Structure formats: C-alpha cells, structure tokens
C-alpha cells in the first residue's frame, strides 16, 4: 500500500466526513450486494483527489480485513469502454489477492462463483507482470522504454468489472472511488516476453457460449497497452505509491465489455496466447 499516500489524496474541496460517508456507502453495497446511489453527491464530479481518497479507504479496509495488494488495474483505456461508461479519460485501481479467480481457467477447474458480484461485465485484455520497480529518481521521465524494460512477462487476461453504483449510472469520480469499478480477474499461466509479443499488435475475440460478443486489438488500449502501463506508472509515482516488482498489471480492455450470467462460458482469444476459458456459476 501507499506510504503516506493520504497527503496526495486529501484536500480541502471535499471534507473528510464526505469521504468517509462515500466509503461507507460503497462498502455497504458490496457487503449486501445491493447497488447504491452514486457517490458524486458526496465528493463532487471533478474532485479526483477525493475520489482516489475514497478508493484508498476501501482498499485499506479490505487489507485490514486480511486481503493483500497484488497489483493494479487500468480502467477506461479504450474508446469503446469510455463510451460505454460516459467518461473521457482512464483511471486506475488496486488488485487484491481475493479478486484472483484464475484457478477457474485451468483445465478441469471449477466454475467461478458470482456470489460477490452485483452487476458484472467481462472484458479481454493484456496483463503484465513486472520484474522490477518502476520508480525512477525524482525528475527522471518514465518512458515507454522504462516500462518495457520493467515487464517480465505478458499474459492473457479476463477482467470481470463490476459496479456498486445502481444501474452503472456512474460519473468519473464514481468509478474512481469504486476502485475503478473492479470485481474479479483471471490471468493465464503461460506468458510471453516482450521479445516474443508486441502488445499493440495483438487481436482479441471474446465469446460467450460460442457467440462472439466483443472484439478489438492492442491499439484500442491507449494506442498500445505499454502506453497504458506508462500512464499508470506516472500516476502511481505521482500519488506516492510506485509500481513494484512482482505486481500484476491489467492494462485495460481491448474491446467493449459485455454482460454475462450464471452458467455462461466465456472465452477470450488473444493472439499469441492460448485461449483463456472460464465458466461462471451463481
């Protein structure tokens, strides 16, 4: 978790009471699986430090309950998803070990339970595992080469995004506060180095029960999933919590996200990788 990160998140525009109330509203929605009203009435529509303060409060609460941070996710990187959400810029959130349901993608693996989800959608993307920290000295620029050199391996991924906000009626501060609308994630076991794969050149097809429901390519993710990673590294350092070796990074959707239901089988085929296949149950 961030060291002394609250100095980056809090400011006078939004009161601590309002931030705490937003944390409580989202936490109760998750605990009860009953979607709640947006939190922008509490934190405003453009106070991003306040929105990230709410996110930090949610994550710290889950860590206090025993969860462990294992990486980050980048949200709203593709124009298709930005249009679906009604936003015009990316955001980021935290990945926790309790969100990892990758065992369901192993041959013969059990179906993935939807018992913690409220209004899930699924998207296909490229994930990165970092082999070194991305924390250059003050003043040093974080470039594409910086993050490329930090990547140990790329993996295929499914992100199950979710919203505690009723009917996905979100503004940008709502999705930021809600840990970037995170839910669960699945990553494949067989990765490729960046000598073996150029992320911007990949293509993606996502099927549900054999019917293609989403498609896209690496260029749809901020022009290059590595550019998305660079953007995240800059933001993470700015907020005082740099990316670290061993972190898993979900770089963002390669195509539109789509809804699914218990009993559905979802398969993401990303060029260069073996297909990633999971089934869901209530």
Image (cartoon, rainbow, N blue to C red):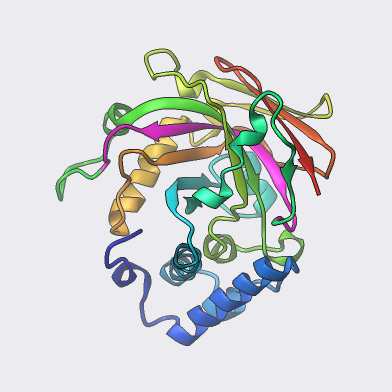
Query: 148 or 143: which is nearer to us?
Result: 148
Residue 62 x %, y %: 50, 64
Q: Is residue 3 left or right of residue 94?
A: left
Residue drawn 57% across the image and 39% down it: 78
Query: 80 or 150: which is nearer to us?
Result: 150
Query: 44 or 235: which is nearer to us?
Result: 235
**Position above or below: 147 against 93:** above
Q: How many marks?
A: 0
Give the residues drawn in magenta, as a range: 117-134
Residue drawn 31% across the image and 33% down it: 147
**Position above or below: 278 against 22:** above
Residue 22 x %, y %: 56, 76
Residue 99 x %, y %: 57, 49
Residue drawn 43% across the image and 52% down it: 69
Q: Is residue 13 left or right of residue 76?
A: left
Q: Is residue 126 magenta?
A: yes
Quadrant showing the N terminus: bottom left
Residue drawn 49% across the image and 33% down it: 127
Tell me the quarter of the picture where residue 152 sits.
top left
**Position above or below: 175 against 259:** below
Q: Is residue 261 left or right of residue 165?
A: right
Can residue 62 be seen from the camera position used here?
yes
Tell me the quarter of the picture where residue 49 sits.
bottom left
Residue 216 x %, y %: 64, 27
Tell me the quarter of the picture where residue 247 sits.
top left
Can residue 15 be seen from the camera position used here?
no
Q: Is residue 34 magenta?
A: no
């Amino acid at each position: 978790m961030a060291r002394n990160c609250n100095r980056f998140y809090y400011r006078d525009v939004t009161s601590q009471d309002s931030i705490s109330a937003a944390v409580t509203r989202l936490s109760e929605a998750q605990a009860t699986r009953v979607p709640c009203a947006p939190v922008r009435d509490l934190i405003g529509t453009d106070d991003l430090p306040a929105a990230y303060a709410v996110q930090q409060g949610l994550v710290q609460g889950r860590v206090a309950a025993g969860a462990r941070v294992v990486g980050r996710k980048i949200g709203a990187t593709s124009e298709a998803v930005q249009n679906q959400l009604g936003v015009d810029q990316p955001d980021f959130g935290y990945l926790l070990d309790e969100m990892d349901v990758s065992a369901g993608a192993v041959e013969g693996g059990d179906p993935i339970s939807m018992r913690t989800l409220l209004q899930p959608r699924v998207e296909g993307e490229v994930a990165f595992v970092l082999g070194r920290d991305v924390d250059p000295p003050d003043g040093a620029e974080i470039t594409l080469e910086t993050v490329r050199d930090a990547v140990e391996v790329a993996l295929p991924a499914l992100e199950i995004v979710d919203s505690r906000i009723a009917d996905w009626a979100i503004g940008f501060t709502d999705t930021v506060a809600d840990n970037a609308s995170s839910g669960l994630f699945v990553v494949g076991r067989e990765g490729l180095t960046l000598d073996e794969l150029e992320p911007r050149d990949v293509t993606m097809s996502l099927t549900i029960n054999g019917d293609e429901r989403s498609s896209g390519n690496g260029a749809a993710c901020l022009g290059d999933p590595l550019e998305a990673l660079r953007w995240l590294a800059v933001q993470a350092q700015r907020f005082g919590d740099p990316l670290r070796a061993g972190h898993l990074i979900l770089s963002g959707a390669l195509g539109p996200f789509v809804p699914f239901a218990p009993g559905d089988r979802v398969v993401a085929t990303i060029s260069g990788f073996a297909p990633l296949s999971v089934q869901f149950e209530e």
